[in-house]
Amino acid sequence: MYFAEWLAWLAYIDPKEERDAFEKNHKKTNISIYESDEQDMLDAAKRSASSNPLSRGPVYVYNKHILEMRCGMMEDKRGLITILSTAVILYSLVNIAMALEDLTILIGLLFTYNGEPYAGTLLTGSVFLTLGVGTLWLYLKFGLRFTRFEMFTSRHLLIRFNRTTQQVYLHRPPYCGGIVTLPWYGVTSSGSDKKYAAAGGFGLPLDLIWPPSFAGALHPELIHVGKAANNFTELQSEWEFIRRFMDEGPEGLPRPSLTSHFPWPWQAFTPQFEGLTHYFRKSSRITKLGLVLISPAFLIIGTGHWLSLMLCWKPRWPRIIREAGLPGKPVPPLTTLDDYPPAIQARLRENAYLWATRPGKRPQRKKRTSTRKPKTEIATACLQNDISGETHRADGSSG
């Protein structure tokens, strides 16, 4: 669930030595952003994107001052890591339990030994103990970090819009960048214009991006908000709902249905079908039959999703963010580079050049010119004589 955010954070804090080694073995691709591009995106985010503002959720808090939604990428894929992690943990515990059972027998023989053979019990107990403890040690050392993408962590990534303070708050685990406070006026969106969205807007949630000049920590902030979309129109409606709430207020907006943080079963099974309504409607009968045949896989993943929700806890905001906008309460300071540990600050500074905006306007693309050499006047005259001669011969034969 948090895999995409984790990868993005690793890209921001990747050590220079590892990045240089990767670029040496792989083709380097630079995506340059110019000041004009950034300004166009900011201007587009201030304009109305749709006449039908609508939030498809999930929305957890909605009032005159606060709009809180789910964010994060690949929420619909949640469950597979939980199933694998649970299998490994159960395998380790079963082996340890069997080793303890053999150990109990050996301890009993120690006090009441009457010549019974115990070599087999000692051997099997040693094998089970080695398998159980060894597997558990390997899991804790190498696997737990991936398990925490879905288990033993915050139940959801959250984004909170506060129109009183005109700030946006991101709730993420520390290994994904932590809790961040951002200014609303620096946001750009994939729903503001079709050229900023993925082709068709199919199967992806709404993107909100803060350029490095507004994010405050020398790197951009990219957040995926809400459910995956079936088309670009849904992205526009979602973005327009958020924009109007922050810029104009909740008056005139359709009130969204609120979602509970309690892990109800349907919250685990419905996300698997986010962004696929259009695909199901347009698919052939053979595709629909294939989906029916693999429906048990959806059931298994959904069960893992539900298990992961139950093994996580409700995210809780810091007090200063919970009270932000209330009379007499302080306004949370915007996140800056100084809010991170010194080692992280050093890496963010090293990699700042990767996200830096180029000054000026994007240069216009040069028109493609033909590489064929232009014909000389002699060659052109010869070609015209050949054409005229063929025309005369054709006229004579027809007569």
Image (tube, grey):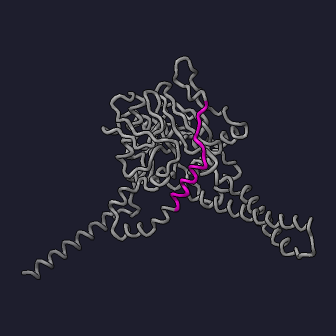
**Could you tell me which residue is drawn at 39 percent across and 45 percent down?**
235
Quarter assignment of residue 348? top right
In this picture, residue 154 sits left or right of residue 256? right
- Image quadrant in which the C terminus is located: bottom left
**Residue 192 makes an appearance in the image:** no
Left or right: 272 as drawn, with respect to 317: left
* Residue 311 included in the magenta stretch of the image: yes
Identify the magenta region: 300-318
Residue at 23 percent across and 68 percent down: it is 384
Q: Position of residue 76 (x, y in %)?
A: 49, 54
Where residue 278 appears, as percent x and y from the top left, is: 35, 56
Q: Nearer the viewer, residue 89 or 43?
A: 89
For residue 157, above or below residue 61? below
Left or right: residue 387 compared with residue 261: left
Q: Residue furthest left?
A: 399
Placement of 145 over or under 396, stated as above or below = above
| Nearer-the-camera pick, 28 or 92 | 92
Q: Nearer the viewer, residue 240 or 268?
A: 268
Q: Residue 110 at x, y = what percent?
A: 92, 66
Residue 188's place in the image compared with 162, above or below, is below
Q: Is residue 132 visible?
A: yes
* Residue at the top extreme, as displayed: 328
Residue 72 in the magenta stretch? The answer is: no
Residue 52: percent from left, percent from top:
31, 39
Numbered disc total = 0
